[in-house]
């Protein structure tokens, strides 16, 4: 399973976008609630539901020796390989120089090693993030989820976290980026 190391770039929604979706003036909203709880909350829900990186982030995952060249990366929407390290017999990690071929599909990205997969356990670090201009339905899902939570906070806000939205809540808007389940 991929570990998110850090986000980069701006959040996927702005206070102004959420205010417009809610039909409320931005100055009439609580900026801290929107920017610190609702926007990160709906982003995390969408990432969890789809398996895709919605906001730009750096991820890291370990590949056992059984993962061959061409295996799919865990986080969908991967767009750049940052590094590939292989574990040596003494437990140290050594950077691999490549070449690497990241093939991006609509839902998954797969990493190929044209010169052959390096031996041993691999630690792959990569960047991933969704281009919302190419997938406007995802932005709509995020905005509708944020507006629903803003309008009906008693249903979703639990302390400082958000409860999950109903499982069928506009899922068709994010279906095109949803990573297939793996067993």
Image (cartoon, rainbow, N blue to C red):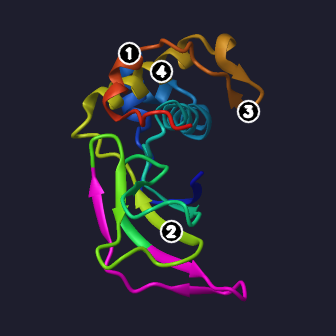
The residue indicated by pointer 4 is 145
Judged from the image, the secondary structure of the residue bearing numbered disc 3 is loop
The verdict on residue 90 being magenta is: yes
Residue 124 bears which disc, if any? 2
Label 1 crowd bin: few (<14), some (14–19), many (20+), radius 10 Å: few
Judged from the image, the secondary structure of the residue bearing numbered disc 1 is loop
In the picture, the quarter occupied by the C terminus is top right
Label 3 crowd bin: few (<14), some (14–19), many (20+), radius 10 Å: few
Which callout, 1 or 3, points at the residue further toward the start of the chain? 1
Nearest to the eye among marks 2 and 4: give it: 2
Which callout, 1 or 4, points at the residue further toward the start of the chain? 1
The residue indicated by pointer 1 is 23
* C-alpha gap between disc 1 and disc 3: 24 Å
- Measured as percent of width and height from the top left, residue 109 is found at 35, 52
Q: Nearer the viewer, residue 97 or 68?
A: 68
Label 2 crowd bin: few (<14), some (14–19), many (20+), radius 10 Å: many
Left or right of 170 in this view: 155: right
Nearest to the eye among marks 3 and 4: give it: 4
Q: Nearer the viewer, residue 134 or 60?
A: 60
Residue range corresponding to the magenta coloring: 83-104
């Amino acid at each position: 399973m991929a570990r998110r190391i850090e986000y980069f770039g701006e959040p996927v929604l702005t206070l102004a976008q959420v205010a417009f979706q809610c039909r409320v003036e931005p100055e009439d909203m609580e900026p801290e609630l929107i920017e610190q709880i609702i926007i990160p909350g709906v982003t995390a829900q969408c990432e969890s539901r789809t398996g895709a990186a919605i906001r730009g982030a750096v991820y890291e995952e370990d590949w056992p020796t059984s993962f061959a060249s061409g295996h799919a990366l865990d986080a969908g929407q991967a767009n750049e390989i940052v590094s590939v390290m292989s574990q040596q017999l003494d437990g140290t990690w050594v950077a691999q120089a490549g070449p690497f071929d990241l093939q991006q599909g609509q839902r998954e990205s797969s990493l190929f090693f044209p010169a052959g997969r390096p031996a041993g356990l691999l630690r792959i670090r990569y960047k991933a993030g969704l281009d919302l201009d190419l997938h406007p339905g995802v932005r709509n899902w995020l905005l509708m989820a944020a507006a629903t939570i803003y309008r009906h906070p008693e249903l979703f806000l639990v302390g400082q976290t958000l409860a999950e939205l109903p499982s069928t809540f506009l899922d068709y808007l994010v279906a095109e980026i949803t990573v297939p389940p793996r067993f």
